[in-house]
Image (cartoon, rainbow, N blue to C red):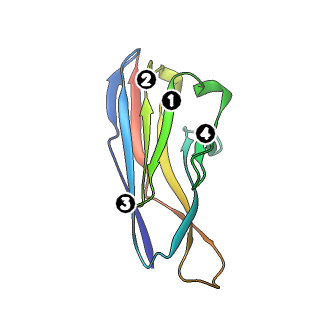
Amino acid sequence: QVQLVESGGGLVQAGGSLRLSCAASGTIFRINGMGWYRQAPGKQRELVAAITSGGSTNYADSVKGRFTISRDNAKNTVSLQMNSLKPEDTAVYYCNAGVQYSTGYAFRNFWGQGTQVTVSS
């Protein structure tokens, strides 16, 4: 089994910064893509940022230039630095990872439990 544990959410004023972290643990042979998604009340879950094992990144247009995703492959962690936060960034943020248990096994998708980010105006 694989667990993804997020940390770093909280309440911040508009214009402020937060850093989210996610650590993967359990039976892990390899992780390919890792990413952060968010879901605001009444809205669908959406991709915020993603990063491949090689370090290529992809961002939602709404966060480009403000958020930065990074990962440490040796520690199986992924982080999201969020700057210039806006009230519309308020949501529950979820960590996601594609994990392979062992060689020859298919990659499986895992999610963290979510961490609340609230940006006040």
Specify the label residue 75 is tagged with: 3
Q: Nearer the viewer, mark 4 or mark 1?
A: 1
Specify the label residue 83 is tagged with: 2
Above-or-below relation of 53 to 12: below
Q: Amino acid at mark 4?
A: Gly
Image position of 7 (left or right of 90) = left
Above-or-below relation of 91 to 101: above
Q: Which residue is mark 1?
A: 67
Assess whether mark 4 and mark 2 are in contact (beta carbons under 8 angstroms): no
Assess whether mark 1 and mark 2 are in contact (beta carbons under 8 angstroms): yes
Assess whether mark 3 and mark 2 are in contact (beta carbons under 8 angstroms): no
How far across and down, in percent of the image, does residue 54 sit?
Answer: 59, 52
Q: Nearer the viewer, mark 1 or mark 3?
A: 3
Q: Amino acid at mark 1?
A: Phe
Q: Nearer the viewer, mark 2 or mark 4?
A: 2
How far across and down, in percent of the image, does residue 56 sit?
Answer: 62, 44
Using a 10 Å C-alpha cutoff, classify the residue at mark 2 as few (fewer than 14 neighbours), some (14 to 19) or many (20 or more). some
Image position of 65 (left or right of 60) = left
Question: Gap between marks 2 and 3, in whole Å?
Answer: 24 Å
Specify the label residue 42 is tagged with: 4
Q: Earlier in the sequence, mark 3 or mark 4?
A: 4
Residue plotted at (54% across, 56% down): 96
Q: Amino acid at mark 3?
A: Lys
Assess whether mark 4 and mark 3 are in contact (beta carbons under 8 angstroms): no
Q: Earlier in the sequence, mark 1 or mark 3?
A: 1
Above-or-below relation of 117 to 45: above
Secondary-structure class at tag 4: loop
Quadrant for the C terminus, please.
top left
Question: Gap between marks 4 and 1, in whole Å?
Answer: 23 Å
How far across and down, in percent of the image, does residue 32 sit?
Answer: 59, 62
Q: Earlier in the sequence, mark 2 or mark 1?
A: 1
